[in-house]
Amino acid sequence: RKEVEQDPGPFNVPEGATVAFNCTYSNSASQSFFWYRQDCRKEPKLLMSVYSSGNEDGRFTAQLNRASQYISLLIRDSKLSDSATYLCVVNTLTGGGNKLTFGTGTQLKVEL
Amino acid sequence: ETGVTQSPTHLIKTRGQQVTLRCSSQSGHNTVSWYQQALGQGPQFIFQYYREEENGRGNFPPRFSGLQFPNYSSELNVNALELDDSALYLCASSLLSSPYARYNEQFFGPGTRLTVL
């Protein structure tokens, strides 16, 4: 089983739609969670950090369910500029230190 | 912009050669992490340096090595290059309060695209 799993998509949605991405992680000792956005051939950019049960920032809401080892990202009122790949990231503290594990990403295409 | 810079932006090498990639962290950050991203995949963790010490390593062979300098900039060295090493190499910087800090928000540089022929 992969450490971090995401539906690769693509999700094709009309402008204004609400879209939700799901992510599961395998290591119950994981401490903190992030969503990054990556545009084509660019570096990942931090979108949201999730340290407790959830976080909201404008049109974006992230939720964490530690019991189910599940993280979600909800985007409301999608814009064309939201088109990108969304990466689910899990931070785990190991004996050797700190480690971020990325999912393979979910591709979103917002259309007119 | 994150303030994290990487050089060079692109590089072409042949199999068996050695390469050094460089990263300057964001001002005030003390930790640098390196990732390899193949096409269509998420970034894969190579290793992390906290205050000049290795602070975690992913499943990469010893020919991947690194260094962090007193100014917290960093190098990634790859020896005996293989074709599969062709990828985007990303550096990310963060400010950790300790090697085991839970709050590990990382900010990425633009990456170095390495092609091995």
Image (spheres, rainbow, N blue to C red):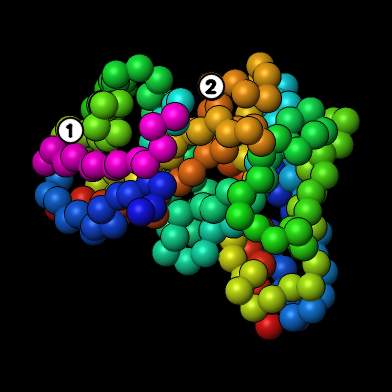
**Residue name at image x 49 percent, y 59 percent:** A41
Q: Say whether marks 2 and 1 touch (CB < 8 Å).
A: no
Vertical arrangement, residue A73 with respect to residue B77, above or below? above
Residue A24 colored in magenta in the image: yes
Is residue B32 among what the camera can see?
no
Residue B84: % across, % down: 60, 74
Q: What residue is shown with label 2?
A: B102
Q: With respect to residue A11, does B3 lie above or below?
A: above
Q: Name the residue rendered at 14%, 51% in the picture.
A: A13
The answer to whether residue A66 shows anywhere in this view is yes
Which dot marks residue B56?
Answer: none
Residue A50, x across and y down, in percent: 38, 24
Three-letter amino acid code at the position of disc 1: Arg
Q: Nearer the viewer, residue A64 or A43?
A: A64
Label 1 environment density (alpha carbons within 10 Å; few <14, some 14–19, many ≥20):
some
Residue drawn at 35 percent across, 40 percent down: A25
Chain to which mark 2 belongs = B
Q: Which residue is mark 1?
A: A76
Q: Measured along the vertical axis of the image, is residue B83 above or below residue B48?
A: below
Residue extent of the magenta highlight: A17-29
Nearest the viewer among A7 and A109 is A7
Specify the quadrant that holds the N terminus of chain A: bottom left
Residue B61 within the magenta-colored segment of the rendering: no
Chain to which the residue tagged by mark 1 belongs? A
Query: For residue B72, what is the image quadrant?
Result: top right
